[in-house]
């Protein structure tokens, strides 16, 4: 069994619109470094943009940590968005396309899940939210995680 | 730090504070001719002297409080605004923060000379420790000015960004009744508000029937950007103009589909040229290739 090893690339604050631009910029650079093609880069940056905005708008601000992954010959990038906001009471519903508690399109969370290879949410009401996504270059080393 | 040296240092900061107050006039006269003040107050030496005066007072009060290494010492707050103005004025003149910091450093020799002369008069005092105290204080001032200059620079950048926002969204008349906005950069809420306003204005002014939003220069289209685009399209429609979104690159097209954004109600074309051809065709104009005679709708 091959082990996955990681190296932290950066930990960036998400407190303002300017921070969102920085996060996109960072993910663009990190994704290029890992060796993603243009389409995969664009997908990952867009997913990061959605999740970072959720952290800012719904979570009241937080941070993102990016980690370079190595798994045998596969390389990947993992992004974890964390906030200490209200949490998501009903994850299933939040993931439903078109559901929004604000004035959005309600596509960010579900859309981000479709744009990446692995996606997980850790949240509990009152204790904040942490969303983790992973993209691999080429074939993901594990079968694509079925979205819950 | 031992109690002994703490006590010595307390004495020393008091001596420096006394020195600054007692010698205020002489220091002011020396500083007013230094680059830091001379370059900002080019017209009036009196103004330069006045500014130097408040700086000496601020330093005296920082020394009196004993917090000579503390950028947040209350003594500094009084001169922050003045230093910000000076730094901003130097920055506009093209000086880098490091250069301004060097000019602050240049204030030290003249005041150190004065301190040594001053202490030579008093009996038995070794001037060494007090020179060190003054040096530390002037070093903190240098840092403080540097920090102020940097934040003044940020303010300038913020202002320029706002100005850029307006400049960077020109609405171009392509043909009678056809206008276009080439969007470049991040389409955040502030930006898209500006875009919408200038586009609607142009639609009225030009009596445009077609408005082309070209997003070739927009790096990321996420759900918020899409929402802004759709709102702009809807508003243009209310004004009687049809919007065409052009310049959707292949990678962005795939991403939009995965995100689940439905642009079905929006007319889209691959390039600005295609969008123009479409609008011209709708208007009844036809582009004909003279070599082949081919033309018509796209
Ligand atoms: N970090 C978070 N903390 C708390 N609630 C969240 C968080 N992220 C998402 N949510 C909840 O999930 C809902 C759906 O999120 P989603 O990103 O899909 O839509 P949206 O943000 O409302 O609109 P948009 O389409 O513009 O992203 C949100 O409206 C919000 O109620
Ligand atoms: Mg969202």
Image (tube, coloured by chain):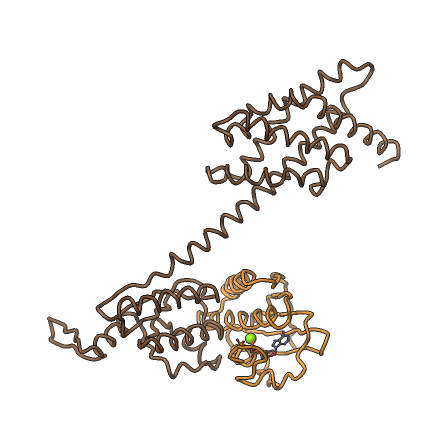
Reply above or below: B262 against B67. Answer: below
Residue A17's x, y, as percent? 54, 63
Q: Nearer the viewer, residue B88 or B203?
A: B203
Residue B16's x, y, as percent? 75, 26
Q: Is residue B44 left or right of residue B295?
A: right
Which chain is drawn using orange? A
Direction right: furthest residue: B3
Q: Nearer the viewer, residue A141 or B82?
A: B82
Reply above or below: A5 against A93. Answer: above
Residue B50's x, y, as percent? 59, 28
Residue B265 figure quarter: bottom left
Residue A20 figure quarter: bottom right
Could you tell me which residue is drawn at 14 percent across and 72 percent down?
Answer: B289
Could you tell me which residue is drawn at 72 percent across and 75 percent down?
Answer: A126
Quadrant where the N terminus of chain B sits is: top right
Quadrant where the C terminus of chain B sits is: bottom left
Could you tell me which residue is drawn at 44 percent across and 69 percent down?
Answer: A38
**How many marks can you see?**
0
Which chain is drawn using brown? B
Could you tell me which residue is drawn at 24 percent across and 71 percent down?
Answer: B177
Residue B230's x, y, as percent? 42, 76
Q: Nearer the viewer, residue B207 or B166?
A: B207
Q: Is residue B228 left or right of residue B134?
A: left
Reply above or below: B30 against A125. Answer: above
Q: Nearer the viewer, residue A121 or A101?
A: A101
């Amino acid at each position: 069994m091959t082990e996955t090893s990681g190296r932290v690339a950066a930990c960036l604050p998400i407190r303002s619109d300017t921070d969102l631009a920085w996060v996109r910029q960072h993910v663009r650079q990190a994704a290029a470094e890992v060796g993603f093609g243009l389409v995969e880069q664009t997908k990952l940056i867009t997913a990061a943009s959605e999740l970072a905005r959720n952290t800012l708008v719904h979570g009241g601000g937080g941070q993102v940590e990016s980690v370079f992954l190595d798994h045998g010959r596969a390389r990947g990038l993992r992004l974890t968005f964390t906030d200490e906001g209200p949490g998501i009471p009903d994850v299933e519903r939040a993931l439903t396309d078109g559901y929004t508690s604000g004035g959005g399109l309600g596509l960010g969370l579900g859309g981000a899940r479709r744009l990446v290879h692995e996606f997980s949410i850790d949240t509990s009401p009152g204790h904040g939210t942490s969303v983790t996504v992973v993209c691999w270059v080429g074939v993901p080393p594990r079968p694509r995680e079925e979205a819950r | 730090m031992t109690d002994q040296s703490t006590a010595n240092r307390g004495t020393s900061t008091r001596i420096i504070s006394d020195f600054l107050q007692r010698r205020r006039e002489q220091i002011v006269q020396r500083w007013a001719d230094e680059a830091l003040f001379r370059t900002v107050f080019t017209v009036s030496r009196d103004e330069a002297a006045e500014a130097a005066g408040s700086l000496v007072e601020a330093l005296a009060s920082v020394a009196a409080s004993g917090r000579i290494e503390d950028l947040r010492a209350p003594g500094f707050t009084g001169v922050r605004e003045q230093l910000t103005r000076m730094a901003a004025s130097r920055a506009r003149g093209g000086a880098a923060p490091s250069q301004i910091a060097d000019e602050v450093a240049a204030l030290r020799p003249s005041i150190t000379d004065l301190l040594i002369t001053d202490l030579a008069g008093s009996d038995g005092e070794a001037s060494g420790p007090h020179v060190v105290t003054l040096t530390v204080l002037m070093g903190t001032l240098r840092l403080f000015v540097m920090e102020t200059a940097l934040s003044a620079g940020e303010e300038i950048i913020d202002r320029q960004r706002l100005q850029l926002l307006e400049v960077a969204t020109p609405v171009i008349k392509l043909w009678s009744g056809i206008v276009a906005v080439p969007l470049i950069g991040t389409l955040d809420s502030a930006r898209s508000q500006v875009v919408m306003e200038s586009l609607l204005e142009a639609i009225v002014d030009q009596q445009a029937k077609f408005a082309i939003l070209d997003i070739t220069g927009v790096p990321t289209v996420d759900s918020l950007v899409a929402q802004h685009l759709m709102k702009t399209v809807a508003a243009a429609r209310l004004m009687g103009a049809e919007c065409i979104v052009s310049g959707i690159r292949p990678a962005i097209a795939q991403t939009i589909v995965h995100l689940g954004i439905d642009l079905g109600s929006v007319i889209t074309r691959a390039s600005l040229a295609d969008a123009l051809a479409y609008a011209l065709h709708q208007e009844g104009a036809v582009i004909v290739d003279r070599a082949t005679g081919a033309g018509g709708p796209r």
